Image (cartoon, rainbow, N blue to C red):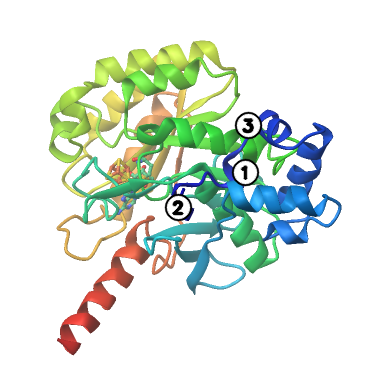
Amino acid sequence: MTKAQKIDIKSLQIDELRAIAQPAYRGGQIADWLYKKRASAFEEMTDLPANLRADLAEKFSFGKIDIVRVLGSRDTTRKFLFRLNDGNLIESVLIPASPALYGSRSDRRTICVSTQVGCAYGCKFCASGLEGFSRNLAPNEIVDQLIAVERESGEKIDNVVFMGMGEPLANIDNVTRAIRIINAPWGLGIGARRITVSTSGLVPQIRQLADEPLQIRLAISLHGATDDVRDRIMPINKRYKIDMLMSACEYYASRKKQWLTFEYILIAGVNDSDEQAHLLAKHARRVSAKVNLIPYNTVAGLPWSRPTQDRQEQFLSILHGHDVAATLRREKGHDIDAACGQLRLQTQRELQAKTFARA
Ligand code: SAH
Ligand code: SF4
């Protein structure tokens, strides 16, 4: 077996750790080394017998992800660019306190993690989809984003949003595996209510996630209140129309004691009309969703822009007029606040430019 084919130790659940190391309490010791003491190699697990450590090293990989670039400073949003073992680049974002964010209070730090390299869903406004899809992340590559960011920043993360690069529900098996590790007391111990998965609207997987016992939160990237508008900017809508999506949301809400969130990027002249606001309110009331309005972040090479501040406020007040819980992200300084996927894209373009310059 080559190294690349080995399963990574940080992809295993506790029952699997117990099964690979006898007697079973050794499994708990390994979990402690991985998630409490944050070991970075089997040799560091000094209370395990040497032959067990050698055996584990033989059978499992112990990956790590390298930070290649950090943007931002301590009290602002910080972006981390990582290189995976196979050379692919992904990014995570560490967001300081923001009352508008998913279950976070003012003293909470939120990490936004990636779930795939690239994205196959090709939403017209998004940087992550621009270069197509490369591969799914393994569970350990998702968990390692938290571990690496905590190590680098020295800060404790207490809120996780799956809103980085990729479509989490297109990689649902690895994502739910990672979530169990992030949530478990033997793992990173972050409460399920502090974990939010965002999806562009994969209807069958929303239903599948609804049937999972985990009480995690779900955010839907809606971005349009009619099929007409959504078809224009999100190809997934050709497959799963808004009505199908809302039925799946109703099902999710019925299975979990959690509010749903609708993400709604405001794009000038595309989805920001009064009519869209009224219809969005109708959908939100149907499934008891909160609405998060996000002024569009421009992406180099794409034609879209955000509406004026007045238009944003007017859109928000229509939602409030329908008694929908809605917030509008108003913070300034968007240089690096831009949505996930952009740092990677920028770095790749710089690297390509260098390669061309040398050729
Ligand atoms: N694929 C999933 C999760 C990753 S995208 C999803 O689409 O939900 C995370 C969020 O960032 C989504 O709501 C997405 O629509 C939004 N987003 C993408 N590009 C953006 C941009 N340029 N400005 C603001 N938000 C953006
Ligand atoms: Fe993929 Fe989400 Fe970007 Fe759409 S918005 S291309 S689903 S990452």
Q: What amino acid does circle 3 point to?
A: Arg
Nearer to us: label 1 or label 2: 2
Nearer mark to the viewer, of 2 and 3 = 2
Pointer 3: residues within 10 angstroms few (<14), some, or many (20+)?
Answer: some
Mark 1 or 2 closer to N-term? 2
- Quarter in which the C terminus is drawn: bottom left
Q: Residue 241 appears at what percent x and percent y?
A: 21, 21
Q: Are marks 2 and 3 in contact (CB under 8 Å)?
A: no
Residue 186 rendering spot, x and y as whole percentages: 75, 38
The one of 226 and 252 positioned closer to us in this rendering: 252
Kindly identify the amino acid type of the residue bearing the numbered disc 1.
Ser
For residue 104, the mark is 1
Asked if residue 98 shows in the view, the reply is no
- Mark 2 CB lies closer than 8 A to ligand 2: no
Residue that label 3 marks: 193
| Horizontal and vertical percent position of residue 277 | 29, 32
* Type of amino acid at the residue the image marks with label 2: Thr
Picture disc at residue 167: none
Q: Is residue 109 left or right of residue 172?
A: right
How many angstroms separate mark 1 from mark 2 (CA)? 42 Å
As measured in the structure, the alpha-carbon distance from the residue carrying label 2 to the one carrying label 3 is 39 Å
Left or right position of 79 against 125: right
Q: Residue at x 39, y 55 (%)?
A: 340
Secondary structure at numbered mark 3: helix
Q: Are marks 3 and 1 in contact (CB under 8 Å)?
A: no
Residue under label 2, please give it.
Answer: 2
Of the two numbered discs 3 and 1 in the rendering, the one whose residue sits closer to the viewer: 3
2 or 3: tag closer to the N-terminus = 2
| Helix, strand or loop status at disc 2 | loop
